[in-house]
Image: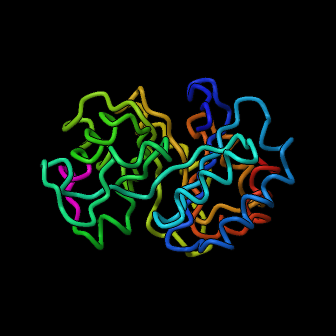
Amino acid sequence: MYNIPHMSSSKGIFVANWKQSGKGKEALKWVSEMEQERNLLTEVNKIIIVCPPLKALDLVEQAILKKHLPIAVGVQDIDVNVFKGEKNTGAQSPDFLTDSATHVIIGHSETRRNNKLTDQDVAGKVKVAQNAGLITIVCVEQVNQARKLKELLGDYQGIIAYEPPFAIGTGNAANPQDANMVAMEIKEILPSTTVLYGGSVDGKNIKGFMQQDSISGVLVGNKSLDASFFKAILKNA
């Protein structure tokens, strides 16, 4: 498993969230195309994390290991009932994911909406994921969700991804300065967290976000399965 640089020393965290894209051949093609930019991947203090669908998790992790690429692997969620101590058929328990993954996305807007997740559910997932040794990436749409995380967990130590609803999958990214203001508020509430921006990020607008003092990287959606698209973000950051 890839040895991840300490987050506080990183100048950029780049997360590729494939969502439900990335079957076997597509996933292996992505890894092979990323290998062609090994110099780009090994830039000092740059952290790259790929979050494939669960079915492709082991395949992607083994392909990355075989090629000795400096890419961490994450999962897109864990089961909502795990933190309640329930052992449900088909549930994604963090204890079984740590062999292949180092990170987990929790509370993405789609997951919150589709699974009717409460703030308490999100906080519970964070606890069990961190206890299992996973680095958590908690998605928030607004500062109030970060404030609630503070109330439930205290000084959360992990990653926050700010994703304004209007920017997710629409092609209309937030203004970088506006996103930075939100990131500053989040860091005031949770000073030990690292804040990413997510929402219609591409190779043309990435520099604007990476120039902001309170934004440490980006969470890119299913377009990140296109290796050329994702590499353009890395190159222009």
Q: Residue 157 versus residue 168: which sits nearer the camera?
A: 157
Q: Residue 19 versus residue 57: which sits nearer the camera?
A: 57
Q: Residue at x 46, y 39 (%)?
A: 159
The answer to whether 76 is drawn above or below residue 226 in the figure is above
Answer with the quarter of the image where residue 115 lies: bottom left
- The percent coordinates of residue 102 (x first, y second) are 49, 41
Q: Left or right of 234: which side holds 27?
A: left
Q: Quadrant of the N terminus?
A: top right
Answer with the quarter of the image where residue 202 lies: bottom right
Count of marks placed on residues: 0
Q: Which residues are magenta?
A: 117-122
- The percent coordinates of residue 39 (x first, y second) are 86, 41
Q: Residue at x 61, y 66 (%)?
A: 200
Q: Residue at x 37, y 57 (%)?
A: 77
Q: Residue 214 versus residue 218: which sits nearer the camera?
A: 218
> For residue 5: magenta?
no
The answer to whether 42 is drawn above or below residue 76 in the figure is above
Our reading of the magenta stretch's main secondary structure is helix
Q: Left or right of 193: which side holds 92?
A: left
- The percent coordinates of residue 17 (x first, y second) are 55, 60
Answer with the quarter of the image where residue 79 lies: bottom left
Q: Residue at x 29, y 48 (%)?
A: 144
- The percent coordinates of residue 94 (x first, y second) are 33, 47
